[in-house]
Structures are given as C-alpha cells and as structure tokens.
Image: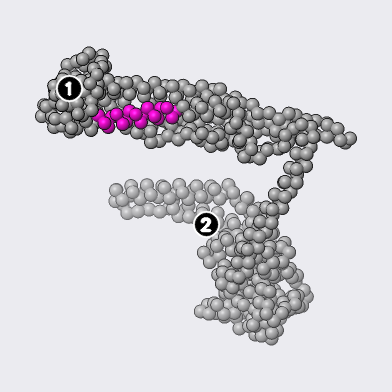
C-alpha cells in the first residue's frame, strides 16, 4: 500500500493556483485515488485545523494581489513624447480595464470561492481512505523535546514551529498509529523546504535531524521525501492512476447499466398500468418522432418544404440557358454583335445596352450579360440561392429549411424543444420561421402523453387521455407564400431570358443564316416592350 502524508501547504495549493508545479487537476487526481481505494491518506488533525485557519486568507490574498496590481497599473507613467504618451495611455487604459474586470469578478464570487473550496477539501478530509491522527500526550512531549534541543524544525531561530513539529512527530511515530508492511511506502510531501529540507542548496534531501529519527524508528527506507505533489503523483502513482481510469470507466458503465435496468423496470410497470385502461405504452424519443412524421399536418408541412425543389429546378434551368447564351455570344463576330446591340437599343427604347464601336467581342458580350443581370435577374444571386439551400424531408428537432429568397434574405425553419415522455407529461415543440434571424411566423406541436392513477382499492382515481395537437397553419401558409413568390420570380426571369434569346437568334439569322449553327432560337418574341 502507498500512503500520502501531505503538509498543510499542499492542501492550500489545491485552493489557490500559486505555482505551476501544483496545477488544479492535482486535487482531482488525489480525490479519485482515494475514492477508488488506490491510496491511503494520513492526516494529522493539526493539518485540518491549519488548513481551515488559512483557507480564507489564501483566497483573500488573490484579491489583495489584484488590488495591488490595479494600483501599480494606475501609477504607471511614460516618457514625455506626445505620440508615445498617447499610445502608452491607450494601452494602460486597456490594461486597467482588464484588471478592474478581473477584480470585480473576484469580489463578486469571493464568498462562493470560499464555500466551494471548503466543500472540496471536506470531501478529502472525510474520505473513507483517510487515516486521521489526533495529537497524543506522547506526540506533544516529543515536540517539546525537539524544541528544547533545537532539533528540526526548531533549528530556525525565532520561527514558531510547533504545528510543523507536531506534523513531523506524527510522521516519525506513524507505526504507533498504523500497521505497516515492509513493502509499504509513505510519501511525505511539503513545500516547506526551509523547515524540512537538508539545506537551501539540497532541497530534495530531508533534514538530517528528521532522517536520524526515521532511521532510529526503522522508517528511512519507507518514507519518501518530496517537494512536488503533482510530479510525485505523475512519477510514483502512475499505475494507480491508470487503475483509477479503468475502475472509473467500469464504475460508470455499471451505473449506466443499473440505471437503464431500473428505468426499463419502471417503464414496464407504468405501461402495464396504462395498457389496462386503454392507453398506449409510453413511447421512446424515436417513436415520437415517427408518430409526428406520419401525421397529416406534418405531411402538409413537408410537402410545402419540398415544393421549394421546383424553384431550384427552374433556377438550374435559367443558369444553364444563361451560360449557353454566353458561350454562343462569345462565338459571334464583333460586327454581328455590334449590329445586334445597336438593333436592340433602337427597338428597346429607354432600356439600352452600353455600346462602344471600339469594343472587342469579350467587352460587348460582358455588356450584354450585364444588361441581363441588371434587368432580368442577377446570375450571382441565383448561384447564392442554388448553392446555399438545405431542406429536410423528415421532421426532427433541427433546422428543417435553410434557403434564400430573391431579395437574398436568409429564410430558416427551426423545430425547437425536446421529448420527455412520462405519464401526465406534456411536451411543446416550437416551430419558427426566421428571416435574417428575425421571427416571421410561429407555430407549435403539443404532445400530451396521458396518464393513470389508482386509488387505495385499485380503482382508477385520476387519468387523462394522450393526444397530439398541431398548430402550424401559420408556418405552412408562410412557406407556401415564399415558394410561390420565388417560383413566380424565377418563372418570370426564365421567360424574359427566353425572349432575349429569341430576339438574338432571330436577328442573327436575318443577317447571317449560318448563325443558326449557334443554336439560337429563330422564333421572334417581343422583349421588354419592344417589337421585332
């Protein structure tokens, strides 16, 4: 068995993170080692007294240090160079603000911190694997003897060391309190190297006075001296910590299995009672979702959602025609393109395509397409709509629809809530349509699971029916409006593009019959109010 014998300062290091050698997780490791029977903790009662006496002071020191830092920051100054001073003042102001925020946070939670760590240390001090050792007359006698002979820790002149000496005498005489086996080890860990170490230069070695006492009591091979708690755990308790991980995993698995069995038993009993009065068994989360999905109102909702696929189909149609048009125009000579634009501008009237007789094919085609993007529909917008849509064909608690309309507004349909089936329970699922994160329409689904209670004679005392109510008409109607409006917009855009393509094909065919090879339609069609 391995024993831990910790000095007061080690416990206080678990309260305040005052050095990196003892990180906060050292507390967690110690507690787990104790809870899973991997170590015994020897605690002289004087240590508990000292810890409780100093705990609040150590936490208050954090606040005092922050106040000192605040005053230091506020008292800082710089060289009298105008630009440098301005930069300095700005940085100091930011630093001062941060320090004040941290100080405010500490002061707000000061009492909570104290109560939290009192509770945390109590979990350590009350653990079943603790060996609590009270002061005895013999221990006190030995302490006084040390004091008379100026033996460690009384070798330091003018220092009050009674508590340290009592801790030390408990360690030296530990066999009077516990039965040790030859293979047992006791790890005495302290930060107080001034009292317990050989010298400042030889901190890692225990003081000769202590070593002599340990040798006299036959404990020099079993007592291990260390100044670093966390490192000692990592180096000397590695196997025990690995066992803790395995045991903890097994423990959690066992708890989960027991909880599942208990819940299954309770559910079976509950369902027997429900079935006896004609109620269905309590459903699982998955079966609730399935039930909702098979309902008429949700089928209507899914149909309204899926109608948006028609919009996407027409957008795809438009995009393909647009790029076919671009490709064909790029294969048309400059003279024909200039004639085309000129003819179009004469017939169109007030809506004209920019024309410069010195432009090359690429520039002219760009101006034609820019006209279409301006007065028909922007191809970039269509790509935004086409590439950034998501619709679900199955109802669940998530985002069911995420699309963009023809004004590039983001439209989302979210189903929010949770399922918690229990007798007499009720769940409400909220449905919200958002436009650019602002709620536009709301609905809800209300699920009542029903329940039954029996009187002392076994008769029905109280009960209610199960039901599912849908209030989502607003959602469905809003979706239909969005789909209808988007479909009208893209249909109109496709129609106008067709008219433009018809005009181009007719014109090019009239001046050069071979242009038919470019696959332009040849049927004339009026466009934007002009006539061919």
What's the residue at 52%, 29% (across, down)? 302
Q: Quadrant of the N terminus?
A: bottom right
Give the numbered dot on residue 509: 1
- Residue beneath disc 2: 65
What's the residue at 59%, 26% (across, down)? 296
Q: Position of residue 6 (x, y in %)?
A: 64, 69
- Apparent side of residue 347 relative to residue 157 in the rendered image (left or right): left
Residue 168 appearing in the image: no
Label 1 environment density (alpha carbons within 10 Å; few <14, some 14–19, many ≥20): some
Give the numbered dot on residue 274: none
Magenta span covers which residues? Answer: 308-325
Tell me: residue 12, above or below residue 456.
below
**What kind of element bears circle 1?**
helix
**What kind of element bears circle 2?**
helix
Camera-side residue of 171 and 71 = 171
Residue 310 in magenta stretch:
yes
Residue 479 in magenta stretch:
no
What's the residue at 60%, 66% (across, down)? 242
* Quarter holding residue 503: top left
């Amino acid at each position: 068995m391995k024993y831990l014998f910790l000095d007061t300062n080690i416990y206080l290091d678990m309260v305040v993170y005052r050095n990196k050698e003892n990180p906060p997780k050292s507390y967690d490791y110690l507690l787990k080692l104790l809870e899973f029977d991997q170590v015994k903790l020897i605690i002289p009662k004087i240590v508990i007294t000292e810890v409780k006496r100093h705990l609040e002071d150590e936490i208050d020191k954090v606040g005092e240090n922050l106040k000192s830092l605040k005053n230091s920051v506020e008292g800082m100054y710089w060289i009298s160079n105008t630009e440098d001073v301005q930069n300095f003042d700005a940085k100091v102001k930011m630093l001062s603000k941060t320090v004040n925020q941290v100080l405010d946070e500490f002061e707000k939670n000061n009492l909570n911190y104290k109560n939290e760590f009192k509770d945390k240390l109590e979990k350590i001090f009350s653990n079943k694997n603790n060996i609590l050792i009270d002061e005895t007359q013999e221990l006190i006698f030995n302490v006084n003897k040390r004091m008379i002979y100026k033996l460690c820790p009384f070798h330091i002149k003018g220092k009050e060391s009674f508590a340290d000496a009592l801790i030390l005498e408990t360690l030296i005489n530990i066999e009077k309190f516990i039965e040790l086996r030859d293979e047992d080890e006791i790890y005495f860990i302290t930060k107080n190297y001034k009292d317990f170490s050989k010298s400042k230069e030889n901190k890692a070695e225990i003081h000769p006075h202590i070593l002599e006492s340990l040798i006299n009591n036959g404990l020099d091979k079993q007592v291990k001296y260390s100044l670093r708690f966390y490192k000692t755990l990592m180096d000397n308790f590695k196997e025990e910590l690995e066992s803790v991980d395995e045991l903890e995993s097994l423990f959690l698995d066992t708890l989960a299995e027991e909880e599942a069995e208990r819940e299954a038993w309770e559910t079976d009993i509950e369902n027997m009672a429900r079935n006896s009065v004609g109620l269905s068994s309590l459903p699982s989360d998955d079966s609730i979702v399935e039930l909702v999905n098979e309902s008429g109102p949700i089928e209507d909702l899914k149909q309204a959602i899926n109608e948006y696929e028609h919009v996407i189909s027409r957008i795809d149609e438009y995009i393909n025609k647009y790029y076919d048009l671009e490709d064909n125009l790029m294969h048309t000579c400059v003279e024909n393109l200039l004639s085309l634009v000129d003819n179009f501008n004469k017939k169109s009237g007030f809506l004209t395509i920019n024309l410069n007789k010195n432009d090359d094919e690429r520039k002219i085609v760009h101006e034609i397409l820019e006209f279409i993007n301006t007065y028909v529909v922007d191809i970039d917008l269509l790509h935004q709509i086409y590439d950034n849509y998501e619709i679900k064909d199955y109802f669940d608690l998530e985002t069911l629809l995420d699309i963009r309309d023809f004004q590039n507004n983001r439209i989302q349909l979210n189903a929010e809530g949770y399922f918690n089936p229990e007798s007499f329970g009720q769940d409400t699922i909220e449905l919200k349509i958002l436009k650019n994160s602002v709620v536009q329409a709301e609905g809800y689904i209300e699920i009542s699971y029903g329940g039954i209670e029996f009187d002392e004679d076994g008769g029905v005392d109280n009960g209610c029916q199960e039901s599912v109510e849908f209030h989502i008409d607003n959602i469905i109607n809003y979706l239909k409006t969005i789909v209808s409006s988007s479909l009208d917009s893209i249909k109109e855009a496709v129609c106008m593009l067709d008219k433009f393509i018809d005009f181009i094909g007719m014109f090019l065919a009239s001046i050069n019959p071979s242009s038919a090879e470019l696959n332009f339609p040849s049927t004339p069609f009026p466009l934007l109010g002009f006539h061919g």
